[in-house]
Amino acid sequence: MANQTKKLTKGDLFSAFIRSNFLQGSWNFERMQALGYCFGMVPIIKRLYEGQERKDAIKRHLEFYNTQPFVTAPIIGITAAMEEQRANGADIPDSVINGIKVGMMGPLAGVGDPIFWGTLRPMTAALGASIALTGSLFGPILFFVLFNAVRLAVRWYGIEYGYSKGTDIVKDVAGNKLQKLTEGASILGLFVMGALVCKWTSVNVPLVVSTVTMLDGKIAVTTVQDIFNQLMPGLIPLILTFICMDLLKKKVNALWIIFGLFAVGIAGFAMGILK
Amino acid sequence: MELSTLQIVAVFLMSCICGMGSILDEFQTHRPLIACTLTGLILGDMTTGIIIGGTLEMIALGWMNIGAAVAPDAALASVISTILVIAGNQSIGAGIAIAMPLAAAGQVLTIIVRTITIFFQHKADDYAREGNLTGIDICHLLALFIQALRISIPAVLVAMFVGTGAVQSLLAAIPPVITGGLQVAGGFIVVVGYAMVINMMGAKYLMPFFFLGFVFAAFTNFNLVAFGVIGLVMAIVYIQLNPKYQATTAVAATAGGNANNNDLDDDLDD
């Protein structure tokens, strides 16, 4: 009965890849990305199951699911491989498939969040923004192309990798390869953040500390900002950053902090302390 | 400036794309760099759009959806503030200031929509019982469409009324001390985003790299690309030398000759 074997085609996986770009479309507070995950699995379910089995498969993939969106790719790959085995008669109960999904989404989000949201996007966005501030279209284009090239590669190769490795991938998640990647990304991200805090901020305190008439008749004016700049440029933004980090850790809403800083700016400007 | 019908239709379509980007978080069409540039293009002043985009992008650098937490909404803030600056003749500083309450409003709107879409989740359960895959697709895409309307309806309303005298005089009534102060605040408000990114990393023991980056920036004229390369090199060296990762390498080295080389390659690939 060899002709009974059900096989996923490259086209099915490609279709799942395209659909996985819409993972979060129906994000809701009850089951979060559950419907989006099922939406990604539709071509696979369509190929493998019919009748009652199809109903069960849809139900199976409507269970609670939430992770960093891009790292969903390998999970889709693995579940596709498992569903294929199951459709060919392997005894894989629902609980195992859901166990893999739930078991992987936590650790993978722990890797995906610092790499994509903590490093890749801030870095490509800051690079694009620094060019955009000069009014050059190259800035937005650079951001869009760089970010999406990496993202789409992760999505496609992630699905392929997950599908070809199947459940073996769990070993990779447990191993230190992903830990290395996360730690490396964090180092890169934090280093660049340090540079951004210093250079891509501007604070000017024009308060005059002393006005000295030099021997040659020139007048040397020293402002508070001059003193700060001699000591350590960017010191005020650094202190502000730490205050913000502390407030955020105390669960203060980021927008309130922004409004607070706006108030500081307006008050400082009105009193002539800030320029 | 009054917008033409064609421009309003274009604003509708573009803000639908931005609204979808905001929930999907995939192509980043909701980020200020993209959304403001597109809005500027439609309104006939792309350069201003790009500059607003760059300024807002730095502020929004740390706005991210982690787990079930919902970030301030960059899409609504970007599209409407750019319309107000270009078509409403406002300064960029004022536009940035208006963008912040808009981000808060967008955040509330997406929370409402994310609650409404629970309905589609349940409708999908019904379709699962019927084995109806098309029904699943429809449920998912309808939910996505509501997220698109969340941005495009407010954006079109603003685009229609921005040219009217009432809106213009309202915007003109903002005193210069406010706009000036907002401009000043714009210089350091970006630290909130930086703080969010640093907190998210949650790696206190790696903070020396943050300070190193800070001091490097204070005393050199390197650009961001240079910082990226230096950061990458340090990350690779750190991982190669870290004793935590040495145990497996040592075992592999005794097992086979080339293991060390392979490990180095892996690190470079990372």
Image (tube, rainbow, N blue to C red):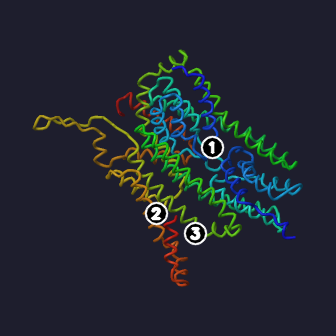
Residue at mark 2: chain: B
Residue A6 percent across, percent down from the top left: 81, 63
**Left or right: A220 as drawn, with respect to B231:** left
Separation of residues labelled 2 and 1 (CA atoms):
30 Å
Q: Which residue is mark 2?
A: B235
**Left or right: B221 as drawn, with respect to B171:** left
Q: Amino acid at mark 1?
A: Val
Residue at 28 percent across and 42 percent down: it is A226
Do discs 3 and 2 belong to a common subunit? no
Instruction: Find numbered disc 2 in the image and state the secondary structure of the residue it sits on.
Output: helix
Q: Quadrant of residue B232?
A: bottom left
Residue at mark 1: chain: B
Separation of residues labelled 3 and 1 (CA atoms):
31 Å
Residue at mark 3: chain: A
Residue at 26 percent across and 37 percent down: it is A209
Q: Which residue is mark 1?
A: B70
Position of A44 relative to A90 (above/below)? above
Q: Which residue is mark 3?
A: A176
Separation of residues labelled 3 and 2 (CA atoms):
15 Å
- Nearest the viewer among A150 and B247 is A150
| Mark 3 Cα-neighbour bin, 10 Å: few <14, some 14–19, many ≥20 | some
| Mark 2 Cα-neighbour bin, 10 Å: few <14, some 14–19, many ≥20 | many
